[in-house]
Image (cartoon, rainbow, N blue to C red):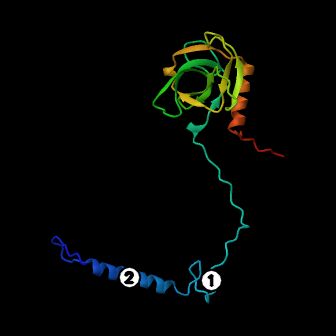
Amino acid sequence: MQWTRCSGRPACLTIGDMAGDVGSYFKKLTSKARGKARGGRRRDEQQTTKPRKTSKKRRPRTRNLPPEGVVAVEYSPRIDGDPDPGEVVWTWVPFEEDPEQGKDRPVIVIGRRGPKMVGVPLTTKRSEREAQVAIGTGDWDPAHRQSYARIWRVVDFDGERMRREGAILARSKFDRVVEAVDEYYEVRFPTADKQD
């Protein structure tokens, strides 16, 4: 059975012609493949490529952070209506799943990154499944419940979007949170070259 519907095309193939073309195509493929071993070489061919040397050490990849990527950590709290490092403030924190949505949460301000403030969100729900540091209670929570710094999540926020200041965090608790963040993210501070 042949089908010759061309609908005005200049060259028209029948089903029989296509079957012949497909057959000749497979015939060419199988004739090229005859005598070849796996890997694309004929059995009688010798290997012409040299094996790759694996003894060469690779340079470790380093990531150069731009100046705006570096967090300037400081402790300078002042209850003056502006968020300062060392304070717990309430600000809008985006959800991880959908950054377009979020909610107001208490955040420990740990420093600055360019024009933005950098903070660690707080929660009153203890979880063994995430990295947290207990910081105790404070005026940032109206019910004075135990709070935990969620050190796995560091957020940048605009200081002008702060809703209110909550309280000043004690220096010892601030240092504990910063150390935990450093350890969690494996921060390495540059060391000065020793001179003899």
The Cα atoms of the two marked residues, 1 and 2, are separated by: 34 Å
Residue 74 seen: no
Question: Mark 2 — residue?
Answer: 23
Q: Earlier in the sequence, mark 1 or mark 2?
A: 2
Question: Mark 1 — residue?
Answer: 48
Under tag 1, what secondary structure?
loop
The residue that appears at 62% across and 83% down in the rendered structure is: 48
Vertical side of 70 occupied by 173: above or below: above
Q: For the residue marked with disc 2, what is the amino acid?
A: Gly
Q: Nearer the viewer, residue 114 or 102?
A: 102
- For disc 1, the neighbor class at 10 Å (few under 14, some 14 to 19, many from 20) is few
Q: In which quarter of the image is residue 70?
A: top right
**Quarter of the picture holding the N terminus:** bottom left
Left or right for 77, reference 30: right
Q: Residue furthest front?
A: 1
The residue that appears at 60% across and 13% down in the rendered structure is: 166
